[in-house]
Image (cartoon, rainbow, N blue to C red):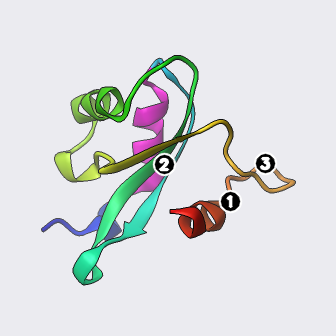
Amino acid sequence: MYRLSKLHPARAALASEMCAPAADVAVFRLPAAHGEQVVAAVVVRRHPCNADVLRVHCRTLLARYKVPRVVSFRNALPRSPLGKVLIGQLLAEA
């Protein structure tokens, strides 16, 4: 099992944003069974796509353990007044 503490969410988000159908992306660690964590991505679509398209794209740029296992889609990401993505709100909704 790889340690996700070495995952820098910005790197995974950058790889996801480089996918043409993705307009905006938030990447974070999501708690899983047995105290483990998985990589999750919330994507705002620019063009129609599905989670498999995003994962295939990310596999070309990232190590296998950094590719998002959980992918969900939204119309917009929740942001603070300063424009930062509210990861806490995304975690609460996951």
The kind of residue tagged 3 is Gly
The magenta segment = 7-19
What secondary structure is marked by label 1?
loop
Q: Residue at x 23, y 82 (%)?
A: 34
Label 1, label 3: how many angstroms apart (C-alpha)? 9 Å
How crowded is the residue under tag 2: few (<14 C-alpha within 10 Å), some, or many (20+)? few
Q: Residue at x 18, y 46 (%)?
A: 64
Against 39, residue 88 (above or below) is below
**CA gap, disc 2 to disc 3?**
16 Å
The type of residue carrying mark 2 is Ala
Which residue does the numbered mark 1 point to in the structure image? 86
The quarter of the displayed image where residue 4 is located: bottom left
Mark toward the start of the polypeptide (2 vs 1): 2
- Which residue sits at x=45%, y=48%? 41
Circle 3 packing at 10 Å, graded few (<14), some (14-19), many (20+), is few
Q: Residue at x 25, y 29 (%)?
A: 56
Decide whether residue 44 is among the magenta residues: no
Residue 53 x, y percent position in the rendering: 32, 26
Q: Which mark is residue 83?
A: 3
Pointer 2 with pointer 1, Cβ within 8 A = no
User: Relative to 71, does residue 1 appear above or below in the rendering?
Assistant: below
Per the image, the residue denoted by label 2 is 10
